[in-house]
Image (cartoon, rainbow, N blue to C red):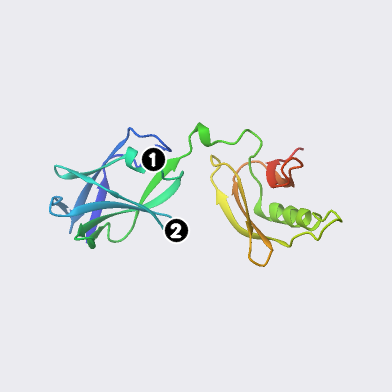
Amino acid sequence: MNDVKALTPLIQKRTEGVQRYSFLLEQDYNDAVPDDRYTYVAAFATEESLVKQVNLTIDGHHLVLKSNQILDVPAGVYRLEIWEMIDDTIHAIFPSNRMLKFSINYNTYDLPNGTVSSLTLDEFERRFKKLAAQAATGTFESPKIKVGKTTTLSSEQPATVEMITNDDGTITINYGIPKGETWVPYINETDGKWHIRLKED
């Protein structure tokens, strides 16, 4: 069985490029010394897809990942595996029975302007559908709007609203909702787009 030990905490702020992460490989409960005939790759993935592959460097008995190699990875919690590659083919995967967790946190540049906090998903969807039904102005037929994918975000992440125009003219709204205080959707009069704001008591 293959395993890997992270010798440093696997967490950093997004865009921070000065961290260094060291890993120790194990095979059948014994230390496995990296072989410079092979290539070692750190594979970052979400629950849905592979996000990025990064070549690791060999430092004695350790493998090293530098944070400046993942500056373009968005904030989030990722599943991490280390692949031992031979001629672009995966030879071994570390660890065998699980995945490591690598957290990239938002920095202050990513935070909203204090206008968005959070919402219960049921309340958001009810209000969003009601507002969508009231969007007709009388001068044109309002596009058909449906609520699409809902993603629950951590309290540090900014809320998101994504509008997708489908081939049949309908509009799908996907939204990400951070945990915290209650917030509601609305149509901004200036740009005519959907936004979300902190609910006033």
> Is 173 left, or right, of 63 in this rendering?
right
Q: Quadrant of the N terminus?
A: bottom left
Residue density around tag 2, few if under 14, some if 14–19, many if 20 or more, within 10 Å: few
* In the image, residue 144 above or below residue 178: below
On the image, the x and y values in percent for residue 127 come to: 75, 53
Q: Which numbered disc, 2 or 1, marks the residue closer to the eye?
A: 1
Identified by mark 1, the residue type is Leu
Q: Is residue 163 left or right of residue 135?
A: left
Chain-order first, disc 2 or disc 1: 2
Question: Would residue 160 be found to the left or right of residue 129 on screen?
Answer: left
Foreground: 189 or 14?
Answer: 189
Q: Is 43 drawn above or below residue 190 in the view shown?
A: below
Which of the pair 54/99 is nearer the observer?
A: 54
Frontmost residue, 135 versus 94: 135
The residue under label 2 is which amino acid type?
Answer: Glu
Q: Around disc 1, counting alpha carbons within 10 Å, would you say few (fewer than 14), some (14 to 19), or many (20 or more)?
A: some
Q: Residue at x 41, y 50 (%)?
A: 78
Q: Quadrant of the C terminus?
A: top right
- Looking at the rendered structure, the secondary structure element under dot 2 is loop
Q: Residue at x 63, y 66 (%)?
A: 167
What residue would you read off at disc 1? Answer: 71
In the image, what residue occupies the spot 42% across and 59% down?
49
Residue 68 place in picture, x, y as percent: 33, 38
Using the image, determine if residue 153 lies above or below residue 28.
Answer: above
Left or right, residue 140 beside residue 19:
right
Secondary structure beneath label 1: loop
Q: Which mark is residue 47?
A: 2
Tell me, yes or no, whether the two marked residues, 2 and 1, touch with CB atoms within 8 Å.
no
Q: Give how far apart the Cα atoms at labels 2 and 1 are.
A: 20 Å
